[in-house]
Image: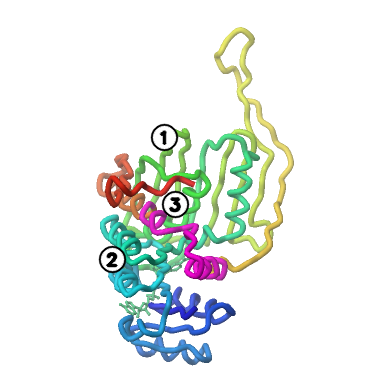
């Protein structure tokens, strides 16, 4: 498999490093419009092939990873797919559902794989937590709470929800097994020339009676990367900043004590049991994601995070943007389809 990476900046350079380490990749083509970036790639990785544009690289690749800024994703990915190349697009897959739908349509028309780079879906701690939730160990899910805070990196094309909360929405969608129906968002701009750099999001999964909250910030002194999952029986915390014990399951909870012969709750009883630290062996999520993408390209298998999942994340973010403009008013998440004959991706 000959794989190109377009956009070899902060994140794309990591994709390049990962691809050079995979035996299933014969050629790594580095594509960037900035010559110094290409020079750095060639200096750091022996044997990579430099190209200054996608057009110049098309004859040399079978698949492409798109790690350019989000506003360019749709144009770049569609050009590659129309040329018959499989594509993995970094999160967020697009900056509107209209763009995302065009990308899904292009993949279908061209008969190629379209995958979205929701990195945390390839994270083994998140996969372990998902298995724990699906096996019912936490009981019925009540609430999820996520925080993703740090200082920088500011992006000038999207706000902090599209940049950071995108990860937490993808984790939440995976854990709940579907997409929220309703979102409310609040955000503030503290830095001239940029969009919201501090924001909060509330998501409601109506049918499952689950709510979830996300806080995202580019303007915080502390690096926080944490997801709390509250179930009826147990609770769990996934903390990506921890070296060990990234995942902890707490045998904690509360029950209402009910007066005999009455349905009136009298008191809340608390249960405080053991804390379990499930073992999670470390595999680099970006490498897991790249391997699974290449496997799909060679077998035609559907990616875990396909174009529809990418579109669903974009739809949540688009609804969040509308809510931001309406000062937190609840906005329904609308998932467009290609038409009545093409069903929406079934919820996981
Ligand atoms: N999955 C993750 O955890 C994660 C983390 C960081 C960034 N990202 C995503 O990766 C993408 C890139 O982010 P970044 O921080 O690396 O940005 P960046 O600005 O550091 O790099 C972007 C690069 O793309 C190049 N570029 C832009 N348009 C181009 C074009 N049309 N043709 C060729 N080259 C072009 C630029 O020259 C630059 O080198 C974004 O979508 C971002 O959301 C994902």
Give the number of the disc on residue 269.
Answer: none
Residue at (59, 52) in percent of width and height: 238
For residue 67, side relative to residue 144 (left or right): left
Q: Earlier in the sequence, mark 3 or mark 2?
A: 3
Tag 1 residue: 206
Q: Where is residue 214 in the image (x, y as percent from the top left)?
A: 45, 49
Secondary structure, magenta segment, majority class = helix
Above or below residue 321? Residue 46 is below
Comparing 59 with 267, the one in front is 59
Alpha carbons under labels 2 and 1: distance apart: 37 Å
Tag 3 residue: 169
Q: What stretch is highlighted in magenta?
A: 287-312
Q: Residue furthest right?
A: 274
Which is closer to the viewer, label 2 or label 1? Answer: 1
Above or below residue 153? Residue 304 is above
SS label for mark 3: helix
Q: Disc 3, disc 2: CB below 8 Å?
A: no
């Amino acid at each position: 498999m000959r794989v190109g990476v377009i956009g070899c900046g902060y994140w794309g350079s990591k994709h390049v490093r990962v691809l050079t380490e995979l035996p299933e990749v014969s050629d790594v083509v580095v594509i960037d419009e900035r010559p110094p970036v290409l020079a750095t790639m060639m200096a750091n990785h022996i044997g990579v092939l430099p190209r200054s544009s996608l057009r110049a690289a098309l004859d040399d690749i079978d698949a492409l990873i798109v790690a350019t800024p989000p506003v360019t994703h749709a144009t770049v990915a569609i050009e590659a797919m129309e040329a018959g190349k499989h594509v993995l697009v970094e999160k967020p897959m697009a900056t509107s559902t209209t763009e995302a739908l065009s990308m899904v349509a292009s993949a279908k028309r061209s008969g190629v794989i379209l995958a979205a780079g929701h990195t945390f879906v390839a994270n083994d701690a998140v996969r372990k937590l998902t298995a724990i939730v699906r096996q019912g160990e936490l009981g019925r899910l009540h609430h999820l709470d996520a925080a993703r805070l740090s200082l920088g990196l500011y992006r000038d094309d999207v706000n902090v929800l599209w940049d950071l909360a995108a990860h937490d929405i993808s984790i939440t969608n995976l854990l709940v097994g579907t997409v929220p129906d309703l979102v409310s968002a609040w955000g503030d701009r503290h830095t001239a020339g940029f969009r919201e750099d501090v924001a909060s999001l509330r998501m409601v999964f109506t049918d499952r009676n689950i709510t979830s909250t996300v806080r995202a910030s580019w303007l915080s002194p502390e690096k926080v990367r944490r997801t709390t999952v509250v179930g009826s029986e147990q609770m769990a915390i996934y903390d990506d900043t921890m070296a060990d014990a990234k995942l902890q399951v707490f045998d904690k909870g509360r029950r209402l004590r009910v007066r005999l012969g009455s349905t009136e709750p009298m008191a809340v009883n608390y249960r405080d049991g053991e804390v379990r630290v499930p073992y999670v062996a470390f595999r680099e999520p970006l490498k897991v994601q790249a391997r699974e993408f290449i496997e799909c390209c060679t077998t035609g298998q559907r990616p875990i995070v396909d174009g529809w999942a990418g579109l669903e994340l974009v739809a949540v973010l688009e609804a969040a943007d509308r809510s931001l403009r309406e000062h937190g008013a609840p906005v329904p998440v609308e998932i467009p389809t290609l038409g009545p004959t093409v069903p929406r991706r079934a919820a996981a």
